[in-house]
Amino acid sequence: MKNRFKFFIKNEYGFTLMEVIVTTFLTSIILVTLFGITIYLWDGVKISTTRFYNYSELKNGMYWIVRDLKRASNVVEAEDGKLVLELQDRTVVYELKDNKLIRISGNVKKITAAGIYRAEFRKEEKDGGVFVEVNLEGKGGKLGTCVWVYTGD
């Protein structure tokens, strides 16, 4: 068994200059490739995180609007950039100012979503209620929904 590998094993100790150079070159190619892949993946993570955050802002704004619409007893005003709702104990106003969707309830102002370019609110009165269409557009894309508000009329 020793005789088989005798060709590969020399009686010399250490590496030749050529072996060191080739090993260094191959190692550097592998490390540069791994570093490039890491940078590429990190950029993808940053882009995905930004998209997720922007879409979450849209969803959060829509959540608050739908929540209040479901509890509303009447829709006073619905136009581009402004929605006025009557709840049982108070009035809630949604306004779009400086790319922020603001919810005003009594003396409390709350930014429900940031990065919103456009907020469209439409209402259509039907028998016994109001049909409200909501469309939001922002950095995260577009999001829309429709809600039936029962007024009992």
Image (spheres, grey):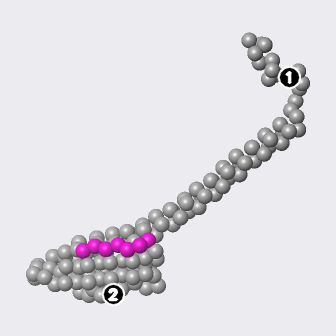
Residue type, mark 2 in image = Asp
Dot 1, crowdedness within 10 Å: few (<14), some or many (≥20)? few
Upstream in the sequence, badge 2 or badge 1? 1
From the image, state whether disc 2 or disc 1 is nearer to you. 1
Rendering coords of residue 21 (x, y %): 83, 42
Q: Residue at x 74, y 12 (%)?
A: 1
Residue type, mark 1 in image = Lys
Q: Residue at x 18, y 80 (%)?
A: 130
Nearest to the observer: residue 86 or residue 148: 148
Q: Residue at x 41, y 73 (%)?
A: 141
Residue topped by disc 2? 80
Q: Is residue 136 above or below residue 59?
A: below
Dot 2, crowdedness within 10 Å: few (<14), some or many (≥20)? some
Q: Is residue 110 visible?
A: no
Quarter containing the C terminus: bottom left
Bounds of the magenta segment:
140-146
Separation of marks 2 and 1 at Cα, in angstroms: 85 Å
Nearest to the observer: residue 48 or residue 60: 48
Numbered label attached to residue 10 = 1
